[in-house]
Amino acid sequence: QVHLVESGGGSVQAGGSLTLSCAASGDIYRRNWMGWFRQAPGKEREGVAIIVSATGTRLYADSVKGRFTIYFNNAKNTVDLEMNSLKPEDTAIYYCAATFEPYGGTWSIYNWDAERAYHYWGQGTQVTVSS
């Protein structure tokens, strides 16, 4: 069983930065899809970014491109999401997720933001951006 634990959430003013971290039990970082999702109040959960360390693949939602960076933090052994130029619309609970099978199994990378592709989920961490 894989457990994911997020940390790093908090409150920040618009234009500020935060870095979220996802720690996972088990050695799944390298080949499995590791993604960040978020859910704002009254909205559906949406994909934010994905990383597949073994292939160097990194994909982002259009709404965060150029502002967010997902990467594997070797020093901490975590998958981090660096968020810059934060906007009030980034306010949400952010979740870390991982696929059950390496390389997403039968899922196409083009569907990286499909929740059903992910088997493991963290409890979430709140990010609040004030204007």
Image (tube, rainbow, N blue to C red):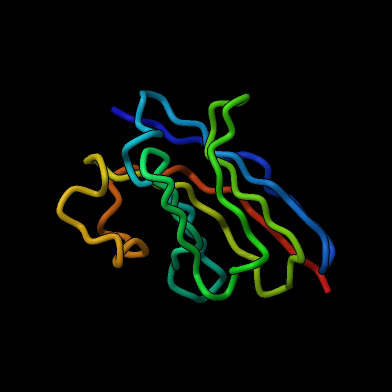
Residue most toward the left?
106
Name the residue rendered at 45%, 42% in the picture: 122
Q: Position of residue 44 (x, y in %)?
A: 43, 72
Does 48 sit above or below residue 8? below
Which of the 4 image quadrants contains residue 77? Answer: top right
Would you say 91 lies left or right of 114 here?
A: right
Image quadrant in which the N terminus is located? top left
Foreground of the two, 54 or 39:
54
Does 118 sit above or below residue 86? above
Foreground of the two, 75 or 94:
75
Name the residue rendered at 32%, 40% in the picture: 32
Foreground of the two, 38 or 28:
28
Would you say 39 lies left or right of 112 here?
A: right
Q: Position of residue 112 (x, y in %)?
A: 34, 61
Name the residue rendered at 35%, 46% in the picture: 33
Q: Position of residue 45 (x, y in %)?
A: 44, 66
Would you say 92 lies left or right of 25 here?
A: right
Q: Position of residue 118 (x, y in %)?
A: 30, 51
Image quadrant in which the C terminus is located? bottom right
